Image (cartoon, grey):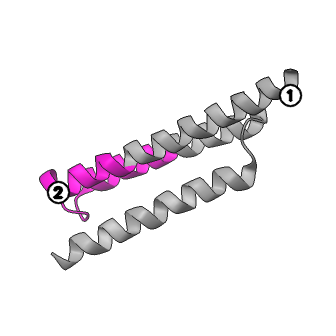
Amino acid sequence: MASEMLVNHREKAYALLKADAEKILKLIKVQMDNLTMPQCPLYEEVLDTQMFGLSREIDFAVRLGLVNGDEGKALLEKLERELSVLHEASLRK
């Protein structure tokens, strides 16, 4: 029973972190499509702030033992790759 609860908490923690990563991606997509270009200081500030916040969330979940460190790192790296693709696409416009 206790191990089932731990697995459930781990799944929830990872799902929440993944949802936060997806929110960042959507926020940056909207910003790039409607507001600013990637070279804009506002864009960079939003991106840096959001990525820092997510990395702190992941670190906290790892320290609690709810997320494996490699999973957290992979989640950040995936988001960084997706953001890089968005950035490159916006430069081609």
How far, Cα to Cα, is label 1 from label 2?
Answer: 45 Å
Q: Quadrant of the N terminus?
A: top right
In the rendered image, which residue does mark 2 sit on?
A: 33
Dot 1: within a 10 Å radius of its alpha carbon, few (fewer than 14), some, or many (20 or more) residues?
few
The residue at the point 52 percent across, 61 percent down is 78
Instruction: Inspect the magenta stretch and tell me whether residue 43 lies in it.
Output: yes
Task: Name which quarter of the figure residue 13 lies in.
Answer: top right
Which residue is situated farthest in the right direction here? 2
The mark tally for this picture is: 2
The residue at the point 47 percent across, 40 percent down is 19
User: In the visual, does 21 lie left or right of 47?
Assistant: right
| Percent of width and height locating residue 69 | 74, 50
Dot 2: within a 10 Å radius of its alpha carbon, few (fewer than 14), some, or many (20 or more) residues?
few
The numbered mark at residue 57 is: none
User: In the visual, does 72 lie left or right of 30?
Assistant: right
| Amino acid type for the residue under numbered disc 2 | Asp
| Percent of width and height locating residue 27 | 30, 46
The residue at the point 20 percent across, 79 percent down is 92
The residue at the point 67 percent across, 41 percent down is 59
User: In the visual, does 91 lie left or right of 23?
Assistant: left
In the rendered image, which residue does mark 1 sit on?
A: 3
Q: Is residue 49 visible?
A: no
Residue 52's place in the image compared with 38, above or below, is: above
| Percent of width and height locating residue 70 | 72, 56
For the magenta stretch, what is the residue range?
Answer: 25-52
- Closer to us: mark 1 or mark 2? 1
* Predominant SS of the magenta segment: helix
Which residue is situated farthest in the top direction here? 1
User: In the visual, does 77 lie left or right of 84?
Assistant: right
Q: Secondary structure at mark 2?
A: helix
Residue 30's place in the image compared with 17, above or below, is: below
